[in-house]
Amino acid sequence: MQFDELRYVCQEAALDLVRQRDRPLPPTVVLPAPERTRLLTLPRFPDDDEARHAVLAELAADEITPTQTPAWGFVAEAEIADRDAVVVVFGARRHAPHLTASWFGEDGDLEEFAPDEELDPTALPFLHPLQHAVDSLPAVGEGFDAMDPKRGGGGGGLPIVP
């Protein structure tokens, strides 16, 4: 899996959440893997950044490190320019996290996602444990080779499992 594919997987997860969940959407961590992509919803996600940091540090220790998942995504509902939107942040081992977003359309679905951009290192500090967890994993070839069937990794696509 390449970094652009990670963006696509996380955006598809956001679209699935919008179509399958009531609003407001619960913040959700996306963990792509060769067999399946896991979506871990956080229905009681704290409002305080320090508490959020602690929740995601525990999640990273329990879900990313043991499975050696080299990438992550985070999906949350937000308000951008006085409009309801979904924000998607995604990161991977040796890749700085990136951010994209999409406004809700009048039909309740998402509009087109904005082009992604690198997340400022001081923004959304509660997400740092996810990036630290993937950065601390042992090297697995270049990029996401273990997840890419074209490079000898696991086969097939990445179905999203709610």
Image: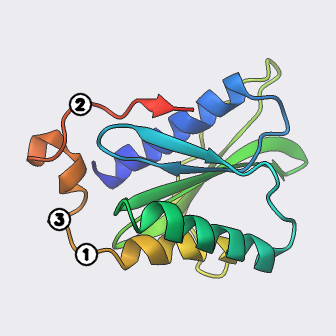
Which of these two is toward me, 39 or 13? 39
Res 19 → quadrant: top right
Q: Residue lying at the far left in this picture: please name it.
A: 152
Q: Who's the residue at 84% across and 64% down the image?
A: 46
| Residues at circles 2 and 1 in contact by the CB criterion of under 8 Å | no
Say whether disc 2 or disc 1 marks the residue closer to the N-terminus. Answer: 1
Say whether disc 2 or disc 3 marks the residue closer to the N-terminus. Answer: 3
The percent coordinates of residue 32 (x first, y second) are: 41, 47
Amino acid bearing label 3: Glu
Q: Which residue is mark 1?
A: 138
The percent coordinates of residue 118 (x first, y second) are: 51, 67
Which of these two is toward me, 114 or 21? 21
Q: Which residue is mark 3?
A: 142
Disc 3 element: loop
Amino acid bearing label 2: Gly
Q: Residue lying at the far top in this picture: please name it.
A: 107
The percent coordinates of residue 76 (x first, y second) are: 72, 49
For label 3, count other residues whose C-alpha is less than 10 Å away and answer few (under 14), some (14-19) or many (20+).
Answer: few
Q: Is residue 125 left or right of residue 141?
A: right
Nearer to us: label 1 or label 3: 1
Which of these two is toward me, 145 or 110? 145
Amino acid bearing label 1: Pro
Q: Which residue is mark 2?
A: 156
Disc 1 element: loop
Residue 115 higher or lower than 140, as above or below:
above
Q: Who's the residue at 71% across and 44% down the image?
A: 86
Task: Judge whether residue 79 can be spotted in this image.
Answer: yes
Q: CA distance from mark 2 to mark 3?
A: 19 Å
Q: Who's the residue at 79% across and 58% down the image?
A: 45
